[in-house]
Amino acid sequence: MTVRNFAARLAPLYVVVFGMVLACATRAQAPAARSAAPPSRTGIAPLPRVTSPRLYVIDCGTLIFNRPEDYNLTRDEVADTNMPVPCFLVIHPKGVLLFDTGLSDHLVGRPVYENVVFGYGQLKFNSLKGQLADIGVSPADITYLALSHSHFDHVGNANDSAGSIWLAQKAEFDLMFGTHATPQEISDYAALAQARTQMIDGDHDVFGDGTVILKYAPGHTPGHQCLYVKLAKTGGILIAGDLYHYAEERTLHRMPTHEQTTATPASRAKIEDFVVEKRVQLWIGHSTSFFRDAIKSPGWYE
Ligand SMILES: [Zn+2]
């Protein structure tokens, strides 16, 4: 979702947000404490053993939204204005990578009208933790956490991954823990301050064999990144993060006005060149046309 163009709308919320600081600070401690507890595998299937990478698409919620104008698209141009919120898991012979953590598991069971942020209603029916367990993955099994970027719909359960190695783009890390981050924002990922952090600055080959690569694509945020996964049967997949939100942004060459003067145009050009060069599929996570037909976990791509 976009943030800068909501700045004006944010102003009346500052008082509310400030008033929530104490409550949020308290809430942020709970996930950190949970992740410190000894993991239990009771009732969880064994971690899948793989000889080549597997990619899982996990349902991490939905954003109820009807303002494609924020993305310089009309309602007639966008087939489906709601936005799915997927998380992605890669099980590689050398370890496990969680890419994005979606909307917070705290939202499960709550009415959408209680949780409207910047005009986006947050809806969630299943927890990330429960869906990982369905795959056979406990928090302790996750070797690496990487975030496409730090907006609320991507970091909702980041605190649960504080026991993993966090592959952090330096520019995003500086944004997340810099002076401009609000206490409300930080509460979603505060526990990462104690995570083992591997700072990266640009593209990064996660397992060192070229099959799982974080692709630096700044603009939407300073440290925004995509994920490339090379699968033995499916071929190459490029998970776009929020480089695009709607498929129509890509086909009609649109982007939010405020991103036109950021690195987004250059990042889109770089990623599109990569897609052509490697002949990969580009997946837009927030696009209903992608998510509707995707194989969801516990099924997988390989
Ligand atoms: Zn997003």
Image: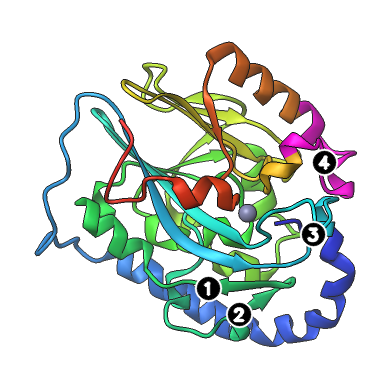
What residue is rendered at 65% in x and 85% in y? 20
What is the spatial separation of the Cα atoms under label 4 and label 1, in whole angstroms?
27 Å
Instruction: Inspect the image, locate mark 1, and give the three-letter code of the amino acid beneath it.
Output: Leu
To which quarter of the image does residue 94 belong? top left
What is the spatial separation of the Cα atoms under label 1 and label 3, in whole angstroms?
21 Å
Residue 233 or 146: which is nearer the viewer? 233
To which quarter of the image does residue 251 belong? top right
Residue for badge 1: 123
Task: Give the SS element for disc 2.
Answer: loop
What residue is rendered at 69% in x and 50% in y? 175
What is the spatial separation of the Cα atoms under label 1 and label 2, in whole angstroms?
8 Å
Residue for badge 4: 254
To which quarter of the image does residue 247 belong? top right
Q: Is residue 47 above or below residue 216?
A: below
Residue 75 badge: 3
> Is the C-beta separation of discs 4 and 2 under 8 Å?
no
Task: Give the SS element for disc 4.
Answer: loop
Residue for badge 2: 115
Looking at the rendering, the stretch of residues picked out in magenta corresponds to 250-266
